Image (spheres, rainbow, N blue to C red):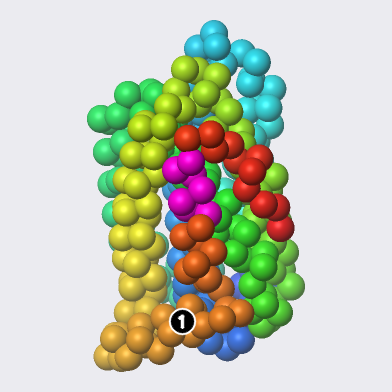
Amino acid sequence: MSDRRASADEAWQTEVPRYWCADDAFETRFLEAMSLIAPEVERFVIGAVHDSLSRAAAEASAVVCAAFIREEGEHSRLHHGFNRRLAAQGVDARAALAPVRRAADFARRWLPRGGRLAAAAACEHLSALLSLSYLRAGRRSAIRSDRTARLFQRHARDELNHRAVVFDLLRNTGGGGWAARTSALAAVSVVGVICVLRVVDVLVRHDAPDRRLATWWRGARRLLAPGRWISPPALLGGWLMYLRPGFHPAQFPGA
């Protein structure tokens, strides 16, 4: 481990409380699940973008996509540093992320290049939805770690700023038809919900194996309460927006 990485890891360990979101275990673990999943999704998206850039029709997108790949790689680096806190707590991140990695490996193996890019565009739309939800959440003021708050805020703003990059690449390479992109969104949404629930459950069981169901019940109610983290009507509205025949991510609101 380099001295720089060791120093960064030590800073995460010393500056971030165990339950850094209002001393609430469930809310903290939910956001940590998002952080664990982020590098896996970004690795898949970067791979899909990189593979599609070899096509002549994508040349016009090359500069924008290169900057996008660098930005996504930086997100992953920062989240990996934050996520190593969990290993120090005894959390088996590899086991928690197993379904995420299986889903990504399946897509890489069985989907054609255009299908992978359509799935990547769907991932980016869902990331933009969650990022907007995060930036609008009044509960952000309950984060008791400036370092963590900066990490999540930077990532959310970057996701909104580059929300059209993969979508435009998909169109420039001859994809982006309504049926292909909407079926990709449906598939990614189902797999994404399953994976998020799985990762959160691993973290919850690590904290309270004997009170798992009670923790889920109380935690999910708080998570969905008005002014917290997730607004189901807003998420559903943003999800349905993607189904419009003339949709473009530029129509999606910023923070």
Residue 113 higher or lower than 71, as above or below: above
State left or right for residue 62 relative to residue 188.
right
Lateral position of residue 207 relative to residue 23, left or right: left
Q: Is residue 243 magenta?
A: yes
Q: In the displayed structure, does residue 120 sit left or right of residue 81?
A: left
Three-letter code, disc 1: Phe
- Position in image of residue 104 (x %, y %): 34, 42
Task: Assess whether residue 17 is covered by the magenta stretch.
Answer: no
Q: Residue at x 46, y 66 (%)?
A: 33
Residue 244 visible in the snapshot:
yes
Q: Which residue is mark 1?
A: 26
Crowdedness near tag 1: few (<14), some (14–19) or many (≥20) residues, C-alpha within 10 Å: many
Q: Nearer the viewer, residue 20 or 168?
A: 168
User: Residue 192 placed where, x, y %?
Assistant: 37, 55
Relative depth, front residue between 224 and 64:
224
Image side of residue 122 versus residue 70, left or right? left
Is the C terminus in the top left, top right, bottom left or bottom right quadrant? bottom right
In the rendered image, which quarter is residue 132 located in?
bottom right
Please tell me which residue is depicted at 36% across the width and 83% down the height of the picture.
216
- What residue sits 56% from the left and 81% below the top? 226
- Residue range highlighted in magenta: 238-244
Identify which residue is drawn at 32% across, 24% down: 112
